[in-house]
């Protein structure tokens, strides 16, 4: 993921921030890493978010939906 993505205001940043608030969650792990999870039934929408965030992480399957999970020590 582009570590600078949330550092400056843009239309893409505002959209992704809204997505995280509506359909995602942020988790802080005890080892200092943070995890951004976004879950949706629409895999093509998650693929677009993945491209927007420049995330290299793969989209996984979670029961009846898909999940983009980004683990980082920088956000």
Image (tube, grey):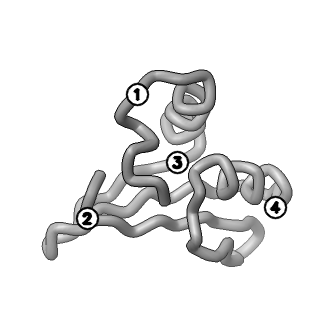
The x and y percentages for residue 40 are: 72, 55
> Toward the viewer: 8 or 22?
8
> Toward the viewer: 2 or 69?
2
Checking the image for residue 23, the label placed there is none
Q: Earlier in the sequence, mark 1 or mark 3?
A: 1
In space, the residues marked 1 and 2 are separated at their CA atoms by: 19 Å
Checking the image for residue 73, the label placed there is 2
Checking the image for residue 8, the label placed there is 1
Number of the front mark, 4 or 2: 2
Residue topped by disc 4: 43
In space, the residues marked 1 and 3 are separated at their CA atoms by: 20 Å
Q: Which picture quadrant has residue 68? A: bottom right
Q: Is residue 60 above or below residue 71?
A: below
Q: Secondary structure at mark 3?
A: strand
The x and y percentages for residue 41 are: 79, 58
Residue topped by disc 3: 24
Q: Earlier in the sequence, mark 4 or mark 1?
A: 1
């Amino acid at each position: 993921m582009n570590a600078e993505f949330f550092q400056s205001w843009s239309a893409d940043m505002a959209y992704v921030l809204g997505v995280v608030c509506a359909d995602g969650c942020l988790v802080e792990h005890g080892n200092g890493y943070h995890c951004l999870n976004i879950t949706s039934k629409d895999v093509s929408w998650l693929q677009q978010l993945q491209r927007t965030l420049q995330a290299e992480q793969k989209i996984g399957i979670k029961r009846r939906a898909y999940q983009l999970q980004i683990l980082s020590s920088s956000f």
